[in-house]
Amino acid sequence: MEEWDEYYHSMHGAYNEAVHVYIQSGLNFWNSNYNLDNTKCRIFEMGFGTGLNTLLSLESANEQNLNIQYETIEPFPLDYQEIKDLNFEPFFNQKKSEALFKKLHLAPWEQTSQINEHFNILKKKTTLSDFNPQTNYDLIYYDAFGSRVQPEMWSEEALLPLIESLAYQGVFVTYSAKGSVRRILESFGLNVFRIQGPPGKREMLRAIRL
Ligand SMILES: C[S@@+](CC[C@H](N)C(=O)[O-])C[C@H]1O[C@@H](n2cnc3c(N)ncnc32)[C@H](O)[C@@H]1O
């Protein structure tokens, strides 16, 4: 059926983009370049959404024996039934992924939950403008809707508090390759790189505090 083809096509697109932008260019990059003492990785994700980036990070933590402290915000949480209807099964990479995915979704808001021995999560039901970072993050996944839909999310005002919370040798990644975003990140003193984008997109941005 054409609609199903389209649906799976877009799910595959979202999955490939998440793996490339956040896991390979973010988490794996940080882990191989800056995690010299094998400490825990403090991750912030802008926009929890379906929880896909979160699950992929958890799977990586399991695979690479990494400890992750994950914090994310989402003002419009989906309920678990809506998530189930999206049918993520084909994208679960490990035997326990389905159970862990459920655990991530059912974890209460506003408090830290231990998901397994490698991973804890704090989900906050808030907008970015009302969010006040309390941690120095090693990794920021900036996964806001595009600037055509939500231009305010890509402004200096929106980005500054998060950038200020980026640790030394911390890495900021986003699927966006927009020149205005690159200039904002540079104006905050980060080293910004336009790198190979996910399949179907030429470039994306990676910024590092050095
Ligand atoms: C591109 S989606 C993120 C997808 C998600 N990372 C995932 O893995 O499925 C953008 C997310 O930002 C959330 N959002 C919208 N406005 C926001 C705001 N002002 N502050 C924080 N999050 C917002 C949306 O509800 C949506 O879940």
Image: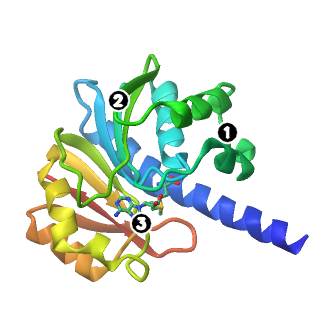
Using the numbered discs, state the Cα–Cα distance from disc 1 to disc 2 in whole angstroms: 26 Å
Q: Which residue is depicted at the point 54% across and 37% down?
A: 105
Q: Give the x, y percent position of residue 208.
A: 20, 55
Kind of residue indicated by mark 1: Phe
Residue labelled with disc 1: 92
Q: State whether residue 23 appears in this view.
A: yes
Residue bearing the label numbered 2? 111
Secondary structure of residue under mark 1:
loop
Q: Residue furthest right?
A: 1
Q: Check contact, mark 1 vs mark 2: CB within 8 A.
A: no
Q: Quadrant of residue 67?
A: top left
Density class for disc 2 (Cα within 10 Å; few <14, some 14-19, many ≥20) is few
Q: Which amino acid does the dot numbered 3 rest on?
A: Tyr
Disc 3 beta carbon < 8 A from ligand 1? no
Image quadrant where one finds the N terminus: bottom right
- Residue 138: x and y, percent? 24, 41
At 55% from the left and 47% from the top, the residue drawn is 52
Q: Which residue is mark 3?
A: 175
- 96 displayed left or right of 168: right
One can see residue 66 in this view: no
Q: Quadrant of residue 96?
A: top right
Q: Nearer the viewer, mark 2 or mark 3?
A: 2
Alpha-carbon distance for marks 2 and 3? 28 Å
